[in-house]
């Protein structure tokens, strides 16, 4: 048996492809869920760190530092395997979504904080002079400007989180990698793993290029 039959077996790929597609659906669902929840959480933590009372600001600092310091896999294992001892049992999808959201939220909070602080303070003063209250000024004036700064690094963080969805296979979630490893065992051939790798590349490579384009586009906009 040559290398092509071992790693690129067309018959095995044909039979395994529907299995991989089911896993891809779970991976995309997990990625989208984590991005939406993590982004919302990160914006809230950033605002808490900047404008909340001191105890809440300290909590925001502690949260962002801990989540950025802990590996995603450790957070996932703690949520899925440790919480049941406290009577909290989560499905593998819920545990993975929460873990990824918590980690992305920490990185998003730091990016959002930097973006908000980069907006000139004169914008707040101008809004106050017009009688616009703080939160309306934040929503209508400050955040739209901060998002121009935030979008490129946040897009890069989102790509990283989509890659990290592969860790969900550790808690037996039927994502793309889990389905590929199961298919590899079923057909006694590594071709499904090669197929999963190619699917990851097909999805993530355009996103990587998109983040590069966003960085260049916004950098040119700042230089004007």
Image (cartoon, rainbow, N blue to C red):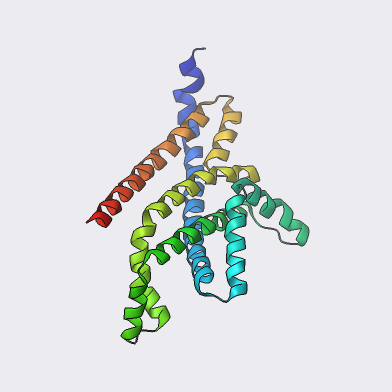
Q: Given the current orientation, which residue lies at the most extreme left position? A: 224
Q: Residue at x 45, y 30 (%)?
A: 14
Relative vertical location of residue 129 with respect to residue 143 in this rendering, above or below: below
State which quadrant residue 82 falls in: bottom right
Q: Is residue 133 above or below residue 181?
A: below
Quadrant in the rendering for residue 114: bottom left
Residue 45, can we see it?
A: yes
* In the image, farthest residue toward the bottom: 131
Q: Is residue 98 visible?
A: no
123 horizontally vs 11: left or right: left
Side (left or right) of 192 relative to 69? left
- The residue sitting at 36% across, 67% down in the picture is 119
In the figure, residue 177 lies in which quadrant?
A: top right
Instruction: List x then y, in percent, for residue 154.
Output: 42, 54
Q: Is residue 127 left or right of residue 33?
A: left
Task: Pick the residue in front: 121 or 83.
Answer: 121
Residue 200: horizontal and vertical position, in percent? Answer: 45, 38
Q: Is residue 180 above or below residue 161?
A: above
Residue at screen point 58% across, 39% down:
178
Of 38 and 202, the residue lying toward us: 38
User: Residue at position x 59%, y 35% from top?
Assistant: 182
Q: Quadrant of the C terminus?
A: bottom left
Considering every residue shown, the one lying at the far right of the view is 85
Query: For this rendering, which residue is in front, 7 or 31?
Result: 31
Where is residue 6? Give x, y as percent. 51, 19
Residue 49 vertical placement versus 10 (above, below): below
Q: Nearer the viewer, residue 164 or 125?
A: 125
How many numbered marks are there?
Answer: 0
Q: Position of residue 12 (x, y in %)?
A: 49, 26
């Amino acid at each position: 048996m040559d290398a092509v039959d071992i790693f690129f077996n067309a018959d095995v790929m044909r039979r395994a492809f529907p299995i991989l597609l089911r896993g891809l659906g779970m991976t995309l669902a997990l990625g989208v869920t984590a991005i939406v929840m993590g982004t919302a959480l990160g914006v809230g933590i950033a605002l808490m760190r900047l404008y909340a009372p001191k105890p809440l600001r300290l909590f925001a600092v502690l949260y962002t530092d801990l989540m950025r310091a802990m590996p995603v896999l450790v957070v996932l294992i703690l949520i899925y395997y440790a919480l049941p001892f406290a009577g909290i049992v989560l499905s593998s999808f819920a545990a993975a979504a929460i873990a990824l959201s918590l980690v992305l939220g920490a990185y998003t909070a730091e990016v959002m904080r930097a973006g908000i602080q980069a907006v000139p303070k004169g914008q707040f003063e101008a809004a106050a002079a017009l009688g616009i209250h703080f939160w309306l000024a934040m929503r209508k004036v400050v955040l739209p400007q901060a998002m121009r700064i935030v979008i490129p690094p946040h897009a890069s963080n989102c790509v990283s989180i989509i890659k990290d969805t592969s860790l969900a296979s550790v808690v037996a979630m039927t994502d793309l990698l889990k389905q590929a490893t199961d298919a590899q065992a079923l057909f006694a051939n590594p071709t499904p793993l090669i197929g999963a790798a190619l699917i990851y590349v097909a999805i993530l490579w355009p996103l990587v290029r998109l983040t590069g384009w966003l960085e260049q586009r916004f950098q040119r906009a700042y230089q004007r």
